[in-house]
Every structure is written in C-alpha cells, then in structure tokens.
Amino acid sequence: MGARVNIRYLDPRLVVTDFEPPQRYPWMDEANCLGVDPEIFFQDVNEVTAPGKKYCEPCPVVNDCLIHALVQENPNVTRYSVRGNTGPAERDHIYRSLRSKQ
C-alpha cells in the first residue's frame, strides 16, 4: 500500500486561494501516471476504486502529488480529477480540516 499524507502536518498557509498556472517539477518524472491517458483520472473520481487510483496507490511520489494538488488548487472551486490518490471529495475534506486549524 502506498504512503499516506498525514494532514495534521500540512501547513494551512500553503493552501492557496488564487489559481496559479501549472508548473512542471522534477518529481513528476517519477510518477506512475507519466504517459497515462489523463482521462482515466477524471472517471468516477468520487469512487474509492476510481480507475486513476490504481496508478496512485503504489506511486513513489504520491505525497508530492497530493501536496502539489493542495497547494495549487483553488479550494473555493469544484475539483474533478484524482490527484495524489485522492478524489475531489477527499481533498474537500482536507481543505476543511486545514481551514479549521487556521
């Protein structure tokens, strides 16, 4: 089973409220999803067994991916894809938890 990010240790100040354009980071070259059709990460995203999650679970950079999603996504808009082995509802829960700590 892949590593999980413990949200208790995420700094709520890292969560942005303004959209920032996507950037490419070196850790992305190690991602299991590299070269995979991105559409798979937009199917059944609220399901625990979403098709895209099969790439995330054993991924060596799953934590980097989740932190990147939390830092880059605007928490005030709807999210659609699987990122860092989480669907939109799971990241919404993380955002709410982080906001309650501020």
Image (spheres, grey):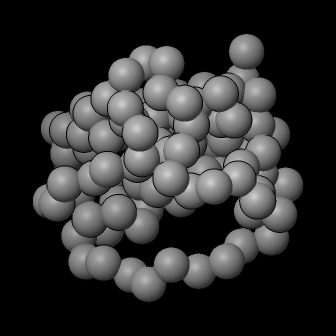
Q: Nearer the viewer, residue 44 or 84?
A: 44
Residue 11 visible within the image: no
**How many marks can you see?**
0
Q: Nearer the viewer, residue 89 or 72?
A: 89
What residue sits 83% from the left and 63% below the top? 29
Residue 100 rendering spot, x and y as whole percentages:
17, 38
Residue 66 rendering spot, x and y as whole percentages:
53, 46
Please determine whether, in this image, residue 29 is positioned above or below residue 4: below
Residue 93 visible within the image: yes
Side (left or right) of 92 relative to 6:
left
Q: Quadrant of residue 75?
A: bottom left
What residue sits 50% from the left and 53% below the top? 39
Q: Nearer the viewer, residue 25 or 41?
A: 41
Quarter of the image containing the N terminus? Answer: top right
What residue sits 23% from the left and 70% below the top? 17
Please determine whether, in this image, residue 50 is positioned above or below residue 23: above
Side (left or right) of 54 relative to 35:
left
Q: Quadrant of residue 73?
A: bottom left
Residue 97 rendering spot, x and y as whole percentages:
25, 34
Side (left or right) of 98 relative to 50:
left
Residue, far right: 30
